[in-house]
Image (tube, rainbow, N blue to C red):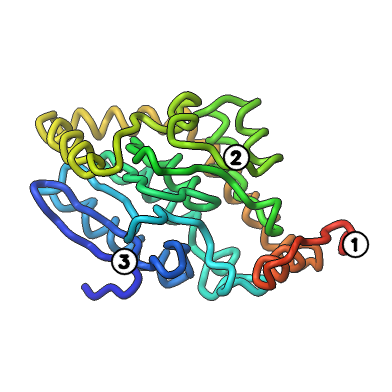
Amino acid sequence: MSFEDIIYEEKNGAAWITINRPEKYNAFRAQTVEELIQAFHKAAWNKEIGVIVLTGAGEKAFCTGGDQSAHDGQYDGRGTIGLPVEELQSLIRDIPQPVIARVQGFAIGGGNVLATICDLTIASEKAQFGQVGPKVGSVDPGFGTAYLARVVGEKKAREIWYLNRRYTAVEAEKMGLVNTVVPHDKLDAEVEQWCAEILEKSPTAISIAKKSFNLDSENIRAISGMGMQALKLYYETDESREGVNAFNEKRKPDFRSKMK
């Protein structure tokens, strides 16, 4: 299986999936999401793999969400919004192995959502988290909103989405978005240690535990499906396009002048 936008590795019973677009701060286009889906399927049904690590290439970013240069009213692939991100989000939840987000830099926008959905998140002290949707004419309804509220609480989740601030790794840990924060040069060792501990446990017991955790929030999948339909309609408005245009032109958006 050949990949262009990601790197797939298997080592010591763990699969490492790396978004390999550092020049784009590991933002994903449709092809990236398709390759991530393929990689997760490849790892999920390999009985030799007991844990999966999701990360980003380079030092600057884990993932910064959708690539705005590939977004013109719709992204450049399949799915409700031209980006099968809801399929990827569901897959991370559905596969039997725990998924660890290894966050070494920016986890912003859709990248923050991916880190939220992963079973566990281990962050470098240099990591930063946050949402930017309303700043660029977008939103991530479902797992990005309702499930985030399950993780950090309603008030904090609304703050994250309404204000679009960035949060340090320590702040993210305090709100429950991150499991642990370690010095930057200790990140890989910490991730490998967590992988080793998981690999000592019963795979079936862990799989049942994961499914039972997810069942409690399974209704959010339906919220996401409906939300993506609304998002598709929103992307076709001048208001949403103003966010994309302003981002690409490196200027402040004027959303209110575009409202109808």
The amino acid beneath tag 2 is Thr
Residue labelled with disc 3? 6
**Disc nearer the start of the sequence (2/1):** 2
State the residue in front, 88 or 248.
248
**Disc nearer the start of the sequence (3/2):** 3
Q: Position of residue 216 (x, y in %)?
A: 46, 27
Question: How much space separates mark 2 and mark 1, taking CA atoms?
Answer: 26 Å
Q: Position of residue 26 (x, y in %)?
A: 42, 62
Residue labelled with disc 2? 145
State the residue in front, 149 or 127.
127
- x 30%, y 34%: residue: 182
- x 46%, y 50%: residue: 106
159, above or below 187, in the image:
above
State the residue in front, 78 or 23.
23
- x 49%, y 56%: residue: 64
| Callout 2–callout 1 Cβ contact below 8 Å | no
Q: Position of residue 240 (x, y in %)?
A: 74, 63
